[in-house]
Amino acid sequence: MNCPICYQQKFKPYLSTIDYSVSQECFDIIECEICGHKSTFPLPVDLDPYYNSESYHPHEVSSGSFIEKAYRFVRTINLRLKFDQLRRLGSGLEILDYGCGTGEFLDFCKSQGFYVSGYEPNSKAGLLTSKRGITMVELNDIQKAVRKYDIISLWHVLEHIPDLNSTVEMLKRNLRPEGRILIAVPNIQSTDSYLYSKSWAALDVPRHLHHFSPAILNRLFNNNGFVLDYRGRLLFDSFYIALLSEKYQKSGILGMARALIYGLSSLIFGLINRDKASSMVFVFRKHPNDTELS
């Protein structure tokens, strides 16, 4: 196994944690001794069972529990916050949302005058997106770069992707010359990650294969011919992640109160220092010297 960031093969244990969401199995997270990138290892041969569960929230929209209601509330706020990140890049642009889930973000962008398409490997979620009248793109078309886009977005998707470098290169081929790629991922260096440690819900093993810091994410895209255009935050993610972390610990009412305190602490520290935000947003553009034909 090579590190996807520095390509070295020297690793050390980082921590062990549990798949609280689905299987209750224990998984290890290892750290590259050279660059510090953290990965879940080893991985199950088949990851599908770890996604196909009512406990896995991104593709579950009908449950009425408190945590699900909190998730939907934060998701509603984040739709506007995500769109604000997008709107600063221009208006009326053509977007591909890679890993679009059930299509809420694209549906909102469509209502604001953007031209939208989505790719979603989960067939159930993809069907829900299609029912919104959103064009779904096949992976084969993305691999062949059949169409070029102004923006390709990955909202909490990159951490799920096994082969980072080949995927980033593939997405680059689908960008127009002045296009941007917009990435949001959990931040392993965040305040709430520190407070919850191995119980931090955003570790989400084994579905999260990679656990990014700001420096590592920037290096990954630099390695693949991108330069940083903009950095932002999804501040309110800290509350949902804290609530979910407490739910996994079955900590009751006191845990819910602690979640609000930890979530607020992470939000405040994220405002002071963006490297401490619970979820980070990066916008990259192709390097001016990139010689790939567009």
Image (cartoon, helix red, strand yellow):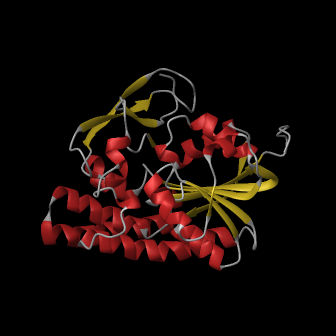
Asked whether the viewer can see residue 101, the reply is no
Residue positioned 73% across, 67% down in the render? 89
The location of residue 19, given as percent across then percent down, is 27, 45
78 shown above or below 41: below
Q: Which quadrant, please, contains the C terminus?
A: top right
Q: Nearer the viewer, residue 268 or 37?
A: 37
The location of residue 70, given as percent across then percent down, is 32, 73
The location of residue 247, given as percent across then percent down, is 21, 62
Residue positioned 48% across, 65% down in the render? 128
Residue positioned 29% across, 72% down in the render? 260
Q: Nearer the viewer, residue 129 or 250?
A: 129
Q: Nearer the viewer, residue 276 or 120?
A: 120
Asked whether the viewer can see residue 260, the reply is yes
Report how many numbered discs are placed on residues in the image.
0
The reply, left or right, for residue 163 in relation to residue 294 is: left
Q: In the figure, residue 80 lies in which quadrant?
A: bottom right
The reply, left or right, for residue 263 in relation to residue 209 is: left
99 shown above or below 263: above
The location of residue 27, given as percent across then percent down, is 28, 36
Q: Nearer the viewer, residue 291 or 103?
A: 103
The reply, left or right, for residue 249 in relation to residue 123 is: left
